[in-house]
Every structure is written in C-alpha cells, then in structure tokens.
Image (tube, rainbow, N blue to C red):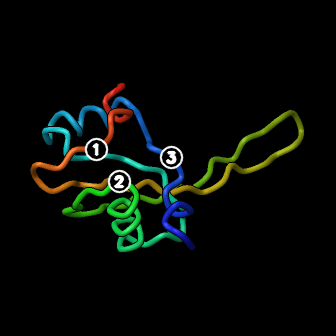
Amino acid sequence: MSRFDILRLPHITEKAAIQKDEREGRIVVFRVRPEATKRQVKAAVQGIFEVEVESVRTANFKGKVKRMGKYKGRRAHWKKAYVTLKPGQDMPEFFDTV
C-alpha cells in the first residue's frame, strides 16, 4: 500500500476547523483507509506534505444502515485520523479554506 493509498481526502468540517484554531493550526483531519495504522498515516503525511508530525489519533466509524423503500443497505465503514504537527510546521493552503 503506497502513501497515496492511505490518505483518502482531507476531512474539512466545522469541528476540524475549531480544533485547528484551538491548536494554532497544528491539527489536520484526514479520512484514511480503515486498515491503515497510525504509523502508516504518519509516514504518508510526512512523505506527501513534507512536514514533521508530532502525533496521530484515529477514530473508527461504523457505516449506517440506510433504507430505500423495501431495500436495506449499509454504508461503508470508515476511519478518520487527527494529525498533530510539530510546532512551526504548516500545511498547504487548501486546509485554510474553511
């Protein structure tokens, strides 16, 4: 699994923006592959964005059961990673759009 397969997309929400503001812009949130480990996420962020990562916290989410008439299905399970950067490190501009 390459580092580009681990990070799916930045998870830009109001909660992520609040956490970023509380930590002087040092926390960035990503949606990652469910089987990715913290070490893999850290290596991927450091390799892709060329920043130093202090810590990584992850959270697993179960997919919700959804109905469409008489049919029932389930959304996919997913994982979110909170990446804390070392002091003095900055992420690219697209994280500042929120």
Q: Which badge, 2 or 1, is on the more N-terminal residue?
A: 2
Q: Which residue is drawn at 36% across and 25% down?
A: 97
Q: In this view, does 52 lie to the left or right of 98?
A: left
Q: Mark 3 points at which residue?
A: 9
Q: For numbered disc 1, what is the local secondary structure?
A: loop
Q: Which residue is drawn at 19% across and 63% down?
A: 54
Q: Which badge, 2 or 3, is on the more N-terminal residue?
A: 3
Q: Quadrant of the C terminus?
A: top left
Do the numbered discs 2 and 3 sit on residues whose CB atoms are within 8 Å? no
Residue 39, which numbered label?
none
Residue type pointed to by label 2: Phe
Placement of 93 over or under 33, stated as above or below? above
The residue closer to the viewer here, 84 or 5, is 5
Residue type pointed to by label 1: Met
- Residue 77 appears at what percent x and percent y? 60, 57
Q: Mark 2 points at which residue?
A: 49
Q: Mark 1 points at which residue?
A: 91
- Residue 27 appears at what percent x and percent y? 24, 47
Q: Which badge, 3 or 1, is on the more N-terminal residue?
A: 3
